[in-house]
Amino acid sequence: MGIEIGAVMIPWYGLFIVLGIAVGAVLGYFLIRANRMDYDDFIQTACFVGLGAMAGAKLLYLIVSWRSIDFSRITDPEYLNALMGGGFVFYGGLIGGLTGLYLCGKILHIPVTDYARAAIPVIPLVHAFGRIGCAFAGCCYGVPYDGPGAVVYTESIAAPTGVPLFPVQAVEAAGNLLITAVLCIYGEICRRKGRKAKSLQLYLVLYAVFRFALEFARYDDSERGILMGLSTSQWISIVICVGVIVLETFWQKRAAR
C-alpha cells in the first residue's frame, strides 16, 4: 500500500517517515540555533541515533514476533527481504537510538547530552509522522470499536478489513505532537531562566505513561508479545518510568551532599 509513481510504489509508512525526518530536521535546526549549538555536530549525532534506532527497532520486532517467523525460509532472499524490510518496534528504536547517542559521544567526542537535551522534541515529532504512516498502511491497529472516529480498512497490510477499529495510530500521533509541544515549551522556559532542562527524562516519562495506557487499545497482540497480560511495550514503559524515577532520586541526593 502506498503511492504509485509510474512503475515505482512508495509505501505509506516509508513516505511519512521521510516526511517526519525532513520536518524533524527543520525543528532540530531551530532548536539547535536557539541553544547556540553547532548544527553540524547535531547532524552527526542524529546519524548515529538514526542508525541505532533502525537497528534497535528491527531487532526488537524480530524478538517479539519470532513465533511468526518461518525459519525454514530464512535463506530465501525474497522472504528475508520482506522480513527485514517491514516491521519495527518503537521502543527498540528508542533503546537503539540511545545506544547510538552514547557511541557518538565516545567516538566523536561530541557533548551528546547537551544535544539530546536541546533536540529531544524531534523524536516525538518524527514518531508522530510514523504513526500517521501506520494509519495509512493499516499496521499497529486498534481494537474493534464502532464509536466516533472508528476506522474501517478496505485494504491493509495487517489490520482486518471491513471491521470498525479504534483509531489508535491517529491518537498516538496526536499524543506525540502534544508531547513535542510540551517539550519545546519546557525547554524554552528552562533556557530563558538559565536552567538545565531535564527534557530527556520528561519525554521518557510522558511517553511511557501515554504508551502504557494506549496499549490497551491495540489489537495486534501477535506482533507485540504478551506476558502476564501486558505487552512488551507496557513492560518497557514500566521499566522506563521506574528507572527514570530511581536515577533522578539518586542524582538529586548525590547533588545535595
Image (spheres, helix red, strand yellow):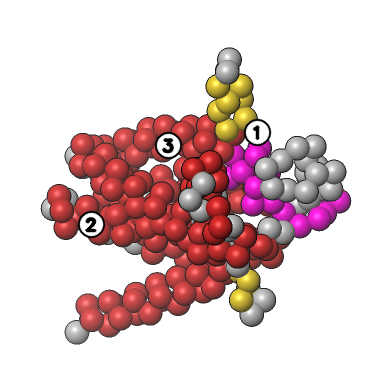
| x 47%, y 65%: residue | 205
Residue 85 percent coordinates (x, y) = 50, 43
Range shown magenta: 130-150
Q: Which residue is mark 3?
A: 21
| Secondary element type, mark 3 | helix
Front label number (3 vs 2) = 2
- Give the alpha-carbon distance from disc 1 to disc 3, as whole Å: 21 Å
Residue 256 percent coordinates (x, y) = 23, 81
Q: Name the dominant secondary structure of the magenta segment.
A: loop
- Give the alpha-carbon distance from disc 3 to disc 2, as whole Å: 21 Å
Q: Is residue 31 left or right of residue 221?
A: left
Residue 133 percent coordinates (x, y) = 59, 39
Depth check, front residue: 114 or 196:
114
User: Looking at the rendering, in which quadrant would you find the C terminus?
Assistant: bottom left
Depth check, front residue: 9 or 200:
9
The disc, 1 or 3, on the residue closer to the chain's N-terminal end is 1
Q: Which residue is mark 1?
A: 1
Q: How many marks?
A: 3
Characterize the local packing of mark 1: few (<14), some (14-19) or many (20 or more) Cα atoms within 10 angstroms.
Answer: some
Q: Amino acid at mark 1?
A: Met
The disc, 2 or 1, on the residue closer to the chain's N-terminal end is 1
Depth check, front residue: 256 or 199:
199
Numbered label attached to residue 103 = 2
| x 15%, y 53%: residue | 107
Q: Is residue 244 left or right of residue 191?
A: right
Would you say residue 187 is visible in this rendering? no
